[in-house]
Image (cartoon, coloured by chain):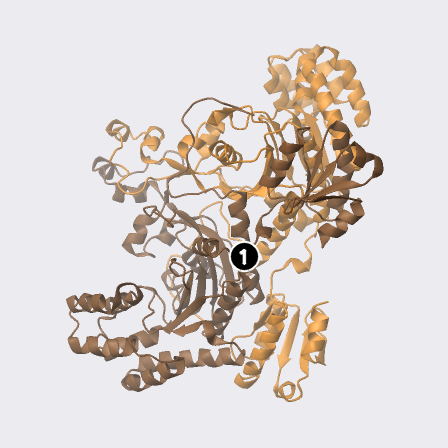
Chain colours: A brown, B orange
Amino acid sequence: MADFILMEKPTLPKGSRDFGPAQMAKRQYILDRIKAVFQKYGFQPLETPAMENLTALTGKYGDEGDQLLFKILNSGDFLKDADQAKLEARDSKLLTTDISEKGLRYDLTVPFARYVVMNRHEITFPFKRYQIQPVWRADRPQKGRYREFYQCDADVVGTDSLLCEADIVLMITEVFSQLHIQDYTIKINHRGILSGLAEICGAKENEKPLFVAIDKLDKIGEEKIKEELRARGFQEASLTTLFQILNFKGNTQQKIDFLSAKFSASENGRKGLSDFQKVLDLLNGYQFSPKHLEFDISLARGLSYYTGCIFEVKINNVAIGSVSGGGRYDNLTGSFGLEGVSGIGISFGVDRLYDAMEELKLFPSEAMISSTVMIAHFDNETMRYGLQVAARLRAAGVATELYPDVSKIKKQMEYANKKMIPYVIVIGADEMKDGQLTLKRMHTGEQEKKTLEEILLEIKK
Amino acid sequence: MADFILMEKPTLPKGSRDFGPAQMAKRQYILDRIKAVFQKYGFQPLETPAMENLTALTGKYGDEGDQLLFKILNSGDFLKDADQAKLEARDSKLLTTDISEKGLRYDLTVPFARYVVMNRHEITFPFKRYQIQPVWRADRPQKGRYREFYQCDADVVGTDSLLCEADIVLMITEVFSQLHIQDYTIKINHRGILSGLAEICGAKENEKPLFVAIDKLDKIGEEKIKEELRARGFQEASLTTLFQILNFKGNTQQKIDFLSAKFSASENGRKGLSDFQKVLDLLNGYQFSPKHLEFDISLARGLSYYTGCIFEVKINNVAIGSVSGGGRYDNLTGSFGLEGVSGIGISFGVDRLYDAMEELKLFPSEAMISSTVMIAHFDNETMRYGLQVAARLRAAGVATELYPDVSKIKKQMEYANKKMIPYVIVIGADEMKDGQLTLKRMHTGEQEKKTLEEILLEIKK
C-alpha cells in the first residue's frame, strides 16, 4: 500500500497525545468502571463546553494558573478593536484581553460552579454530578505531564451532610476493588485538624507556609521541613510541638484521643476531630472495613480551597504520586456570586491510574476492544459464503468481521493476531460443502471443525 | 440554601452548550448504541487531541473553512516575534501566523488522516477506526448549529474492498434498528455514476456546478435547477438529457438497466454502476433486506471528496436534514504526503439524531441515568439504619442513594421524583423494629411493606 511523497511530516502539538485502539481500550476499561461506581452512588453525568469565557476562568487559579490558560484568538478581524498603545508597546499581556475573550477549560471545577450558578433554579439540590472530560494547561510538558489530559470528578453540592464524606470513601474503595488494585491507602485528614495544629504551634496567622511544608513530609522528611519553617520564622518550641504530633504513632482512635487532649483550646481542631469521628461512625454504620484508611495529620493537599475533610489516595509500592484526591469546600460558587453552597468532591487521575495499572499488569487481555471473530477465506466464492456466516454471528450479537480482501491466509491471520481477535473461522471449499467450519482459537493455536451452532455455543460462553 | 450576591452573571460562549444530566442520559443512549454497532463490525476506538498544529489544519477545508478554525493564541509573550510591519498595518490575517500556531480540530477526518500517516508503520491495515469527539467551528450560531458539536465517525482505510460499502449499509440499518427509528431512507449513489451523468450531459469539464445543482433537487425542484444550470452555460439539450435521467421512475434494478444503456460511452459511469451492482450483490449475500435503500442518482453531497459510493440517511416525516452520511474517498492522506490510501467512512450527526428522536418520542424513560433506589428516613436513627440497607443494595449492584440530610419526607420525595428515581424505601421506627421496609414505586405511587430480600427480587427483575 501507499506511496509516500516526501514532505514535512505531520506532528502533534507538544504535550498532546493520540490514543490509539490499544490505549483507548485500557482507558475505557478504567473510565467505565469509575463511571459505573459514580452512578451506583447516585451521581449523574454533566458535560460543559471546552471553551469558557475568559471572564469565567481568569482569577480562579491564581496568577500562575492564569498564565497557563490556553486562550482562543477572537474570530475575524481581531485587531480591529485592539488598543493602539498596547500594539505599539508590543505588550502581549495587556493586548490579550483585546484580542481574546475565550479560553479552554483548565479544570472541571470552575465550569461546574458556573453551571450550578447558571442553572440554580432548575437543579435539584443536593446535586450529585460526575464529569469526565479533558482539560488543557499550557504547562511545560514533561514525563507524565501533558497539556491535554482527562479529569474525572464527582461532586455533591448543596448539603454539608457528612454522609457525602463516607460515600466518597466507599466510592474510592469500590473503584479500586473494580480495578483489582489491592495495595493502596486512602489518606484522610480535616482542614479543622490542620488549623488546630497551626493554633497549638502558634502559627494561627501563618498557616499557609506550615501546611505547604508538612504536606511534603513524606517526600523531604523532618529535618528539611524544620529548616524550611525556621526560615519562615517558626520557633523551636513550635517545631517540637509540631513533630511531637506528626510523629505520634498509634491507630486512628489513639490519634484522635491524643489530638483531643491537645486541642482543648482549639475550636477548629475540635470541630475537625468531631467531623472526622462522625465520618468514621457512618462508615461503621455501613459496616465498612477501614483497612485501607489512614488518618494522616500531615495531609494538606497544598494550597487548596478545602474547608472540611481532605482525601488523598496512593497506590503502595508504585512510584507514582497520588491517583485520587478531594475534599470538602464551603464556597464553590462564591466567585460567581452565589454564596453558601457547600460541596465535596473527589477526582481520579486517569493517566496515573493507567500507568500504575500497566506497572502492576492489571489490565485483562479482554480489555482490548476488538472483534470476537474474524472470518478468513480463500477466494471470492468462500468469501461470499462468509457473508451469511458473518450475518448469523452478528445477529447473535457476536462482534464479527469478514476479512475484506482476497489475500493469503497468512496475511489474514496476521491481521487477526495483531488486532487480538480471539477466534478465526476459516472457510474453504470443504467447509462450504459440508457446513463444518474450521474454528481456530488464536490463544492456543489449536483448530477444530464445528458447525456454526457449536461455534456460537463455544464463543458465547 | 445560598445567598446570591449580585454581580455579573456567568454566561456561556455563544454557540456552546452545557449538557445536564437529562440531556447527557439521552446523548449517552444514542452514542452507546452507535458505539456498540461500530464495535460489532470490527471498528476500534481512536481519540486525537483537541488542538492540532495549524500547519495540519490550514488548507484542508477551503478558504471558508480556514476562516472558521478556532486558533489558539501562543502562550507567553506571543508578540515577541511578531512582525512589526504586520502589527503596524493592523493586519489580523497576516499577523495570525505569527501569534498562533495551534487550532482546535474542525472535523475528525483530518486528525484521523494525520494519525494514519504518523502511525503508518504500526497500524494493521485495513484499519477500521471509530472516533466520537467534539469539533469546533467559528460559524455564526443559529438554531441547530453550534460552535462545539460532536462528530461520530467510522472509517476503514487501506482497502478498496466493496465489502466495506456493504458493511456500512448494514451498520446504518443496525443503528437505526437499535434506536427504534423505523421510517428512514438510506440514499446511495456513486461518484462514477455522477461522472457518467456529467459526461452524457456534455459537462465532463464542468462537473462541479452540475453536482452542486442536482444535489438540491429535493429542496428547490427541477425548474430552479434548470435556471441555475442555464446561467452556468448548460444547453437545453443537456438539460433535457439530465432530467430524462433524474426523472426516471423505477426500482433499483430498472434504474441500473436504464443507466447501463445510457452509459455505453462512459467508462466512469459503467464503473460506478458495476461497483454499485457489486455492493447490492454483497448485501444480497448477507441476506439483507434492502427496503430502506434508495438509489438516488441526484445524491452528490455537495463538493465532497468522495470518489466511489456515496451515502446519505434521512429520517422520513421529520423536518430535520440528513442524520448520517459518508462515502468512499481515494486519497485520505494525500495532503499529508501519503498517497494511495483508499478509505470509506460514515458519520452520524448526534445533535440531529437527538432532535429527531425527541420529536418521535423515542427515548425510553429508562434512558435517565439515576439511582434505582433512594432511601428516605425521619431522623438520625432511621438514617443510620438506612446505611446498612444502602450497603446491602449496593453490594447487590443496585444504584442506591441515602438522602443525605434529615429533612421532611415531602422534600425527600420531591428529590427522588425530580431525579426520576423509580423506587423509594422509607425507613421509620416501625420499619426498624420489624425489618419490613416500606417500598414506594414512584411511577404508580403505590407502596407496600416488604423485606429487603423481597425488595431486591422486585428491583432486579
From the viewer's side, name the closer residue of B77 and B452. Answer: B452
Label 1 sits on residue: B20
Report the label total.
Answer: 1
Q: Name above or below for residue A170 compared with residue A47.
A: below
From the viewer's side, name the closer residue of A57 and A182. Answer: A182
Q: In the displayed structure, does residue A115 sit left or right of residue B460?
A: left
From the viewer's side, name the closer residue of A337 and A134. Answer: A134
| Residue A62 horizontal/vertical position (percent) | 30, 56
Q: Residue at x 26, y 36 (%)?
A: B79
Residue A242, quarter of picture: bottom left
| Residue B178 horizontal/vertical position (percent) | 71, 48
Q: Residue at x 47, y 75 (%)?
A: A290
| Residue A422 horizontal/vertical position (percent) | 65, 46
Q: In the displayed structure, does residue A458 sit left or right of residue A37?
A: right
- Tell me, yes or no, if residue B253 can be seen here: yes
Q: Name above or below for residue B355 compared with residue A213.
A: above
At label 1, counting other C-alpha atoms closer than 10 Å, the crowd grade (few under 14, some 14-19, many 20 or more) is some
Q: Chain of mark 1?
A: B
Quarter placement of the C terminus of chain B? bottom right
